[in-house]
């Protein structure tokens, strides 16, 4: 009989070690190693493939492998979720048998979103199962009433199962065979065959693996809610993200109304797509025109405000960038960002001082993106630079101008991706002119006057003409 042995598993990344360490050597987290009993290793004689000889005397033949001609090339079928923003992030709808992992901060609205989706699907599909490992059935019913989800006997398609035992959940999934099921949340589900506590690496890995096998076998689309760590990443081992087909992050400030649903992994569609929702009294509501949400007030422009167009996947968003430059009373000036990459701000400030001659090394600089949106792509560099210079000179940028371009270390304006898509979004919202990189071809930009610029100082002269004093 094989002896049992203990091993130490990191609860953050899932790495295994033969002895305890204060710090995980794989992910660098302190105090994350926990002792677990490892399964006995089978002897070499019992391992598959040992001692088996081929009886074939001819050419080798594949036992289960297929070539491309034997595999169906039909497109994956999809069905709508009832929310266009969610369908956009998923790549066009829900794929039967797909595993979709949704993570987000506590209280951000993950359970609200999935309960609303379940309510919408129950109006079109015969069986929808919502498994809650965190709330009782009465709590879910009260929340469903606040969200306006039908609860009468005439709509018996939505089933609620408050349960934490994985074996009971699997039995219910096999008996009901729903088209869509929601597991809220995977960290609270436990498998009785394992001795570790719920939420541990072994439990999360095994529970997700068993749910995946059942979902693929009976073509049940499975939404799994996952907790996140204080750093904002999904809690549990990285294998959790590898097992599922799609990983979504539900982001936003709990004190702000809007929420962003972002795709970071999608086997059935593009990544980095976003869907935008707004938290209202009756739950989450889709935002059909997100640019208006992040555009800010163009009727009363202030010094230090500039407009740019950021792209999230294939979606262009017009964003107002705000900058404030002020004298400092300390030896080291302060730099602060909100929604803008901090390191890119430092690079832009250095370029403005070296190539343009603006003495920013002795001034505090604050830059933020209106509405709480995070814009970290290089295409917004020109907007950040013009906003900083406008605040330094106390000038107002024309609110009908949009700024697009990446700034190089030599002060040159470099081309950006998806330029025509950005210009079309700006024209749709009433912008009159756009500063774009010189030399980048544009086939058509109806309603927009294009001003090509090759250097930062050229862009400053075009965006901040003399005589436009601040208010």
Image: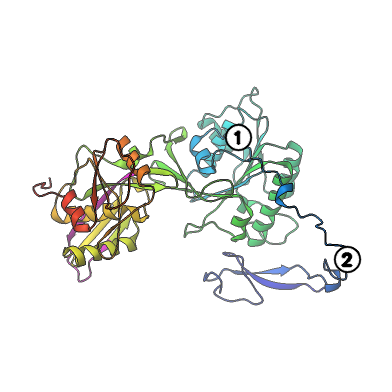
Residue 422 falls in image quadrant: top left
* Up-down relation of residue 60 to residue 118 (above or below): below
Mark 1 element type: loop
Q: Is residue 370 left or right of residue 210?
A: left
Label annotation for residue 54: 2
Q: How many marks?
A: 2
Residue 121 falls in image quadrant: top right
The prevailing secondary structure element of the residues shown in magenta is strand
Q: Viewer-proximal residue, 333 or 99?
A: 99
Q: In whole angstroms, how far apart are the C-alphas of marks 2 and 1?
A: 46 Å
- Figure quadrant of the C terminus: top left
* Up-down relation of residue 190 to residue 22 (above or below): above
Which residue shows up at 61% across the image and 37% down it?
Answer: 78
The residue that label 1 is drawn on is 79
* Up-down relation of residue 300 to residue 199 (above or below): above
Foreground tag (2 vs 1): 2
């Amino acid at each position: 009989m094989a002896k049992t042995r203990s091993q130490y598993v990191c609860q953050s990344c899932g790495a295994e070690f033969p002895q305890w360490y204060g710090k995980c050597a794989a992910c660098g987290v302190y105090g994350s190693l926990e002792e677990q009993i490892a399964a006995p290793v089978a002897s070499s004689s019992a391992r598959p493939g040992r001692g088996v000889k081929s009886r074939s005397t001819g050419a080798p033949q594949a036992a289960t492998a297929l070539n491309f001609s034997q595999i169906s090339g039909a497109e994956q079928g999809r069905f709508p979720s009832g929310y266009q923003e969610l369908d956009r992030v998923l790549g066009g709808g829900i794929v039967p048998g797909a595993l979709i992992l949704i993570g987000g901060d506590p209280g951000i609205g993950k359970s609200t979103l999935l309960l609303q989706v379940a309510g919408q699907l129950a109006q079109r599909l015969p069986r929808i199962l919502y498994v809650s490992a965190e709330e009782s059935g009465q709590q879910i019913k009260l929340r469903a009433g606040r969200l306006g989800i039908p609860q009468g006997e005439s709509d018996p398609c939505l089933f609620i199962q408050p349960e934490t035992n994985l074996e009971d959940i699997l039995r219910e999934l096999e008996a009901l065979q729903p088209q869509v099921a929601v597991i809220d949340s995977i960290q609270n589900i436990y498998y009785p065959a394992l001795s570790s506590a719920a939420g541990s690496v072994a439990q999360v890995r095994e529970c997700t693996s068993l749910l995946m096998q059942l979902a693929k076998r009976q073509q049940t689309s499975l939404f799994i809610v996952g907790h996140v760590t204080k750093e904002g990443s999904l809690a549990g081992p990285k294998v959790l993200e590898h097992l599922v087909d799609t990983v979504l992050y539900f982001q936003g400030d709990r004190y702000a109304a809007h929420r962003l649903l972002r795709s970071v992994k999608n086997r059935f569609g593009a990544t980095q797509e976003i869907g935008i929702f707004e938290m209202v009294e009756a739950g989450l509501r889709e935002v059909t025109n997100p640019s208006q949400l992040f555009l800010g007030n163009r009727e009363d422009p202030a010094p230090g405000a500039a407009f740019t167009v950021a792209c999230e996947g294939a979606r262009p968003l017009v964003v107002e960038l705000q900058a404030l430059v002020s004298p400092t009373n300390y030896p080291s000036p302060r730099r602060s960002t909100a929604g803008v990459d901090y390191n890119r701000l430092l690079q832009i400030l250095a370029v403005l001082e070296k190539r343009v001659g603006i003495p920013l090394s002795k001034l505090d600089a604050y830059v933020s993106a209106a509405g709480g949106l995070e814009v970290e792509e290089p295409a917004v560099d020109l907007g950040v630079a013009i906003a900083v210079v406008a605040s330094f000179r106390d000038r107002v940028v024309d609110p009908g101008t949009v700024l697009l371009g990446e700034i190089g270390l030599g002060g040159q304006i470099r081309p950006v991706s998806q330029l025509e898509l950005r210009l079309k979004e700006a024209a749709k919202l009433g912008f009159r002119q756009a500063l774009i990189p010189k030399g980048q071809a544009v086939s058509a930009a109806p309603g927009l006057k294009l001003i090509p610029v090759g250097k930062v100082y050229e862009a400053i002269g075009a965006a901040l003409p003399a005589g436009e004093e601040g208010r």
